[in-house]
Image (cartoon, helix red, strand yellow):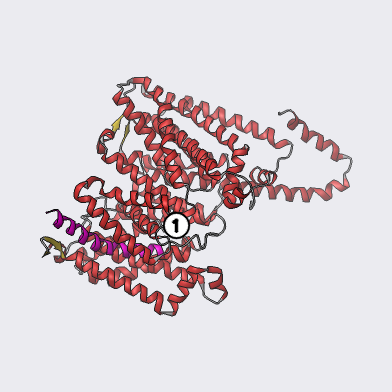
């Protein structure tokens, strides 16, 4: 009995972790290149989910097909936000300013979502959300499998983009040293805008799965989510893509296991793990030692 | 203001143009503002306006308290709602368990402050080990742990929250009394903030803000200094959280531990000028009435939320250093230009110069 539950928890943790990894990778990528933390990422996940919701309700578009519309749309949103609100920030207070700017963007988007969709919870529905497959003594909705598969595909795609293309090389160069990247002729502003767009776009894909699996979202769901994503990327080490993947799976699995015995406290596992790890290792599990601190 | 380690440099940029006549003007202005603040509830007895007054003073205090830590040290905390909520909950739990009723509840204010300060010690010891982004994120994470605890622990009343003891005051007296209590706390907090900024302790904080490693190298014991500021800031935030709770009459997990609170307080300090004494006060005086007014008039909290975010973005993009430093620079440059313009004229009228100077100095000399 307990073994089945444990197994279930681990499977759930890994599958859910895949989706979180997708969202967290976008966030950590943005941090690595732009040296800012996009607090608005949580709300953007929700925005992506609402876009998928609107498409499936009004145009009866399949959720995964809808991503062909929502992902490019969110890419544009990301590029515009970076261009309008992040790029102009300069100077010593840039760190805190960018955080606040992202926060402001987040509450604006949240307010707009409230106005358009109202405060009620919505769920993304499709045949594969409600039907499930019977494996190893428990039922697993198909959406978990499809979502995980998509997350893995997108993460692999991102890796290919970062490690196999010229653009990816310039992104990694910018992550390592912005000044040096500029000196060897990389258009850092363009890289920053595109990275922000990509980080937000993959988030939209994650948002669709999140909206279908989390048992309902409302415009306010972004706060809870962003704090979890932040915990994931800090635990993994800011700017470390591999770290974000490992940390996401680790956190979700730990949460699912604690959930068996203490359901009301399982959410705290995220933050408790974060606090414990940072007490002993302030740079996170895979973080570099303040490589670009100043 | 690139290196603030030199005291004179700070003075020059933070408090522009200390010409002899200016302090007198400043003290006069201060007295006028104080008198206006004291007279406000006597003139405006309309309940909506009066309650905006109390709310504003609560946020003035919260913003100044936030600035004492985050503004002076440069560590941006987005977790101060932890102290605000803890103060409210400490007062609420104590009032319920000890069956305190009526005006005796105000005796719980120091308790709430102490509870918040005690919470700040482990919080600070964990969070202040990391810097910049990571610090901000840790404060957010700890904030969510506290909100979760307020939801889930049994003694907090869960989702229904806690109610404050009922006060048998008439509506007008209710607002007036709360107003004066809040005013006393706000003025005391501002005075404390001013004293800290002038003190050696404040100088150490600002040295940490400019370059923590260099400050440590120069002999600032960074951790105790940061932690002390953090605890002082938490103490005041907890105190004002309890007062807010008595005024509103109820605390819920997501109203006591409200992420918007963190954002609002930070925005007030940024709008007025981060790290200045008057900045957070000015920011709160502008933003809180505007926000309350919008909520009352527009009758649509989403719209006011969108507007808050838009104002925030405009402030960050157009006034990245805040109103007070920007205005200070404008005044300084205006005075410099005027002096330059006056210089050739003064050459021609040497005789007139001493008389004019003397007249300028006299009012300044009378002030200690």
Q: Chain of mark 1?
A: A
Rendered location of residue A28, percent (x, y): 40, 63
Give whichever of A250, B55 is nearer the camera. Answer: A250
* Magenta stretch contains residue A20: yes
Rendered location of residue A33, percent (x, y): 46, 66
| A148 with respect to B189 (left or right) | left
Q: Is residue B256 visible?
A: yes
Q: Mark 1: few, some, or many residues within 10 Å (few <14, many ≥20)?
A: many
- The residue lying at 81 percent from left, 37 percent from top is B357
Q: Is residue A126 above or below residue B111?
A: below
The tally of labels here is 1
Q: Is residue B272 visible?
A: no
Rendered location of residue A25, percent (x, y): 36, 65
Tell me the SS state at disc 1. Answer: loop
Give whichever of B327, A41 is nearer the camera. Answer: A41
- The residue lying at 39 percent from left, 29 percent from top is B47
Secondary structure mostly seen in the magenta stretch: helix
Q: Is residue A35 above or below residue A149?
A: above
| A230 with respect to B329 (left or right) | left
> Which quadrant of the rendered structure holds the C terminus of chain B?
top right
- What span is in magenta? A1-28
* Magenta stretch contains residue A93: no
Q: Quadrant of residue B296?
A: top left
Rendered location of residue B302, percent (x, y): 34, 48
- The residue lying at 50 percent from left, 41 percent from top is B227
Q: Mark 1 = which residue?
A: A283
Give whichever of B331, A273 is nearer the camera. Answer: A273
- The residue lying at 46 percent from left, 26 percent from top is B181
């Amino acid at each position: 009995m307990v073994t089945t539950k444990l197994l279930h928890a681990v499977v759930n943790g890994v599958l859910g972790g895949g989706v979180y990894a997708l969202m967290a990778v976008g966030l950590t990528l943005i941090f690595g290149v732009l040296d800012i933390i996009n607090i608005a990422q949580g709300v953007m996940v929700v925005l992506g989910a609402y876009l998928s919701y609107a498409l499936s309700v009004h145009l009866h578009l399949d959720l995964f097909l809808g991503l062909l519309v929502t992902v490019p749309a969110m890419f544009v949103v990301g590029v515009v936000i970076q261009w309008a609100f992040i790029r102009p920030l300069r100077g010593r207070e840039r760190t805190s300013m960018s955080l606040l700017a992202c926060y402001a963007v987040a509450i604006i988007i949240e307010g707009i979502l409230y106005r358009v969709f109202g405060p009620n919870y919505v769920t993304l529905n499709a045949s594969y959300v409600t039907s499930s497959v019977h494996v190893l003594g428990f039922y697993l909705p198909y959406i978990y499998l499809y979502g995980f598969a998509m997350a893995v595909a997108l993460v692999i795609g991102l890796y290919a983009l970062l490690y196999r293309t010229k653009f990816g090389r310039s992104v990694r160069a910018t992550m390592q040293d912005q000044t040096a990247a500029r000196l060897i002729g990389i258009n850092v502003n363009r890289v920053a805008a595109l990275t922000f767009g990509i980080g937000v776009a993959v988030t939209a894909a994650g948002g669709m799965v999140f909206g279908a699996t989390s048992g309902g979202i409302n415009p306010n769901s972004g706060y809870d989510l962003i704090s979890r994503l932040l915990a994931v990327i800090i635990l993994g080490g800011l700017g470390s893509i591999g770290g974000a993947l490992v940390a996401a799976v680790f956190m979700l699995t730990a949460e699912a296991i604690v959930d068996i015995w203490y359901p009301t406290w399982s959410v705290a596992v995220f933050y408790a793990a974060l606090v414990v790890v940072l007490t002993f290792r302030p740079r996170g599990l895979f973080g570099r030692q303040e490589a670009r601190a100043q | 203001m690139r290196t603030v380690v030199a005291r004179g440099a700070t003075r020059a940029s933070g408090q522009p143009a200390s010409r002899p006549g200016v302090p007198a003007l400043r003290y006069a202005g201060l007295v006028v503002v104080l008198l206006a603040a004291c007279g406000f509830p006597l003139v405006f007895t309309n309940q909506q306006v009066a309650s905006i007054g109390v709310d504003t003073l609560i946020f003035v205090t919260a913003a100044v308290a936030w600035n004492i830590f985050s503004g002076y040290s440069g560590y941006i905390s987005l977790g101060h709602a932890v102290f605000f909520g803890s103060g409210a909950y400490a007062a609420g739990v104590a009032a319920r368990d000890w069956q305190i009723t009526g005006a005796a509840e105000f005796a719980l204010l120091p308790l709430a402050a102490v509870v918040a300060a005690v919470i700040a010690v482990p919080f600070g010891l964990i969070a202040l080990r990391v810097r910049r982004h990571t610090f901000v994120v840790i404060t957010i994470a700890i904030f969510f742990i506290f909100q979760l605890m307020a939801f889930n622990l049994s003694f907090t009343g869960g989702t229904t929250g806690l109610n404050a003891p009922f006060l048998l005051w008439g509506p007008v007296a209710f607002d007036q009394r709360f107003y004066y209590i809040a005013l006393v706390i706000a003025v005391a907090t501002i005075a404390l903030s001013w004293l800290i900024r002038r003190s050696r302790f404040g100088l150490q904080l600002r040295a940490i803000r400019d370059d923590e490693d260099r400050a440590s190298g120069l002999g600032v014991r960074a951790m105790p200094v940061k932690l002390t500021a953090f605890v002082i800031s938490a103490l005041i935030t907890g105190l004002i959280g309890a007062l807010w709770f008595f005024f509103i009459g109820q605390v819920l997990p997501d109203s006591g531990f409200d992420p918007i609170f963190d954002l609002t307080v930070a925005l007030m300090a940024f709008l007025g000028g981060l790290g200045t004494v008057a900045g957070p006060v000015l920011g709160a005086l502008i933003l809180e009435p505007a926000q309350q007014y919008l909520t009352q008039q527009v009758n649509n909290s989403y719209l006011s939320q969108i507007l808050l975010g838009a104002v925030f973005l405009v402030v960050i993009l157009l006034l990245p250093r805040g109103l007070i430093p920007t205005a200070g620079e404008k005044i300084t440059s205006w005075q410099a230009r005027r002096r330059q313009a006056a210089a050739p004229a003064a050459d021609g009228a040497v005789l007139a110069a001493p008389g004019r100077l003397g007249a300028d100095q006299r009012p300044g000399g009378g002030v200690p």
